[in-house]
Amino acid sequence: MKQDISIFLNEKRDPMDFFFNPDGIAVVGASNNALRGGYYLLNNVLEGYKGRVYPVNPRYETIQGIRCYPDIASIPGDIELVIYFAPARSLPETIEQCSQKGIKGIIIESAGFSEVGEQGKVLQQRVSELAARYGIRLWGPNCMGLLDAHSRHVFSFMSWMEWKDFMRPGNVSLIVQSGMLSAGFLMMMLERGGMGISKVCSIGNKCDVNEIELLDYIVRDNNTDVIGLYLESIADGRKFMDIIRSTNKPVIVLKGGRSAFGAKAAISHTASMAGNNAIIESAFRQAGVIQVKDVSELMDFLRGFSKIRRMKPGRGTAIVTFSGGGGIVTADFLHDFGLDLAELSPHTLARIKNVFPDWMDPSNPVDIWPAVEKNGAEKVYPEVIDALFQDPGVDSVILHVFASGKISQRYLEGLAMMQHRYEKPILIWLVGIGEKYAENKAGC
C-alpha cells in the first residue's frame, strides 16, 4: 500500500500531499453503469491507487465487486480524501458528514456552481464557507481532478481507455483551469509522444485550492522538471511571480482571456476575471514566465524543455551553419525574439580556428562549410560544437544540418551525449528532406 512515509515517521507532511497520496478515498457518485462518469471515476481510482477505496451511492450495495456505502457517515474507519461526482445540490450535506469523519479534502468534479449563474454562485459560496469552517480543503469544482503518472493515481472520471495504455511517467507537469482542456492536453501529449507526464492538475472554478498552491507543490516535486499552465485568472499575482522566480524549472503559461471576447467567455466558463492582459504580460516577462499563444505552442515548449530540464538564459546563443545566408536568417530570428548572439571567447575562437582553413577566421554565426571541405564533417562538427558548449558565454546552440540522408544515428547520439554532459540546449534545424529523422530516438 503506497502511502507517504512521513505519516509513519511523524514528520511534517506537505499540506497538499493528501490530495496526491491520500490515506483512504471515498468516491461519491460511483456507478455500476459503464455509460456514466462515476463508473470510470471509480475504475480509474481502483486501477492505480493501492489504498482503501469506498464507493458511495445509496442506489447500490456493491459496485464493481466492492461494497458500496449509502453516505460518508456509514464508512468504517478514517479516510483523508473524498472525490465528489454527484449532484451539486447535495454537496453541503456531504461536507457536513466529512467534518464528522475528519476528512482533509474533497475533489469536486461535478459542475453546477458559479459557472452556471447566480444560483450556482450562491451554492459555491455556501460550500466554500462551510468547508472553511471545518478546515476541509476543496479542489474544483467543475474540474477533471488529477493524475500522477509516477504513482499511477488517476483521480478523474476520464475514460480509462484514453490513458491506461499510453501514460508514460516523465518530467512534465500541467496545471489547467479548464477540465476538458486538461484531458485534451493529456491526450495530445500521449498521442504525439516525445515526453512523459509527472502530474496533471485540473482545478476548474478553484473555489479554494488554486494554481498558487499547486505551482508551489509542483516546483518542489522531484519528478517535475518543466511546468505548463493554462489559466484564465491568477489568484495572487505577486505570489505567483515569486514562486516562479524561486525556481530554475521552466514555467510555460497559456493565458486565456487575453482579448475582450476571451475575457467575457472566461466569465461564463469558470467564472474567472481574466485581468488586464498588458499588465499580466509585463509581469510574466519580468518573472521569466514563457508565455505562449496557443495549445500547439504550449506542447512544443513543454516537449523541448522536457529534454533539457534546466537552462540558465541571459548569456547568448551560438549558431553553427553550413550556409552564411542561413546564419544571417537565424541571427535575425533571434533578434526578433529579443535573444542575443553569444560573444565567443578568444579561447573558443582559437580552438575552432584549428579546424578552419588558414584564410578564414571563425565568428558567430560559425559558418563551418569551408572547414568541412578541408577536414570533413565527422571531425569538424563535434570539435566546433564541443568548443561552443564549453564557452561560458554560450547558453544554447542552434545547429543547421543538411538533411541529405547521410546523417548517422551515431552522430545524433553523440550530439545528445554532449547536450546532456554540458546541460545546454541544442536546437537542430534540418534543412532538406528531414521527415525521416522526425522519429529519431537519439534524445536531442
Image (spheres, grey):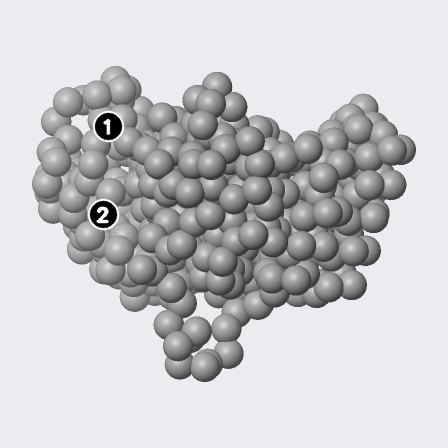
Q: Position of residue 388 (x, y in %)?
A: 31, 55
Q: Residue at x 47, y 41 (%)?
A: 68
> Which quarter of the rendering shows the N terminus?
bottom left
Q: Would you say 395 lies left or right of 386 here?
A: right
Q: Residue at x 57, y 36 (%)?
A: 58
Disc 2: which residue: 416
Disc 1: which residue: 439
Looking at the rendered structure, the kind of residue marked 1 is Glu
Instruction: Identify the image quadrant of residue 7.
Output: bottom left
Is residue 202 among the parts visible in the rendering? no
Is residue 112 among the parts visible in the rendering? yes
Between 143 and 326, the residue placed more toward the observer is 143
Q: Position of residue 8 (x, y in %)?
A: 39, 77
Q: Position of residue 381 (x, y in %)?
A: 19, 44
Against 33, residue 334 (above or below) is below
Between 389 and 83, the residue placed more toward the observer is 83
Against 147, residue 420 (above or below) is below
Instruction: Identify the image quadrant of residue 5.
Output: bottom left
Between 302 and 157, the residue placed more toward the observer is 157
* Circle 2 residues within 10 Å: few <14, some 14–19, many ≥20: some
> Which quarter of the rendering shows the C terminus?
top left
Residue 288's disc is: none
Please tell me whether mark 1 sits on a helix, a strand or a loop.
Answer: loop
Q: Residue at x 28, y 31 (%)?
A: 165
Q: Which mark's residue is nearer the viewer, 2 or 1?
A: 1
Please tell me whether mark 2 sits on a helix, a strand or a loop.
Answer: helix
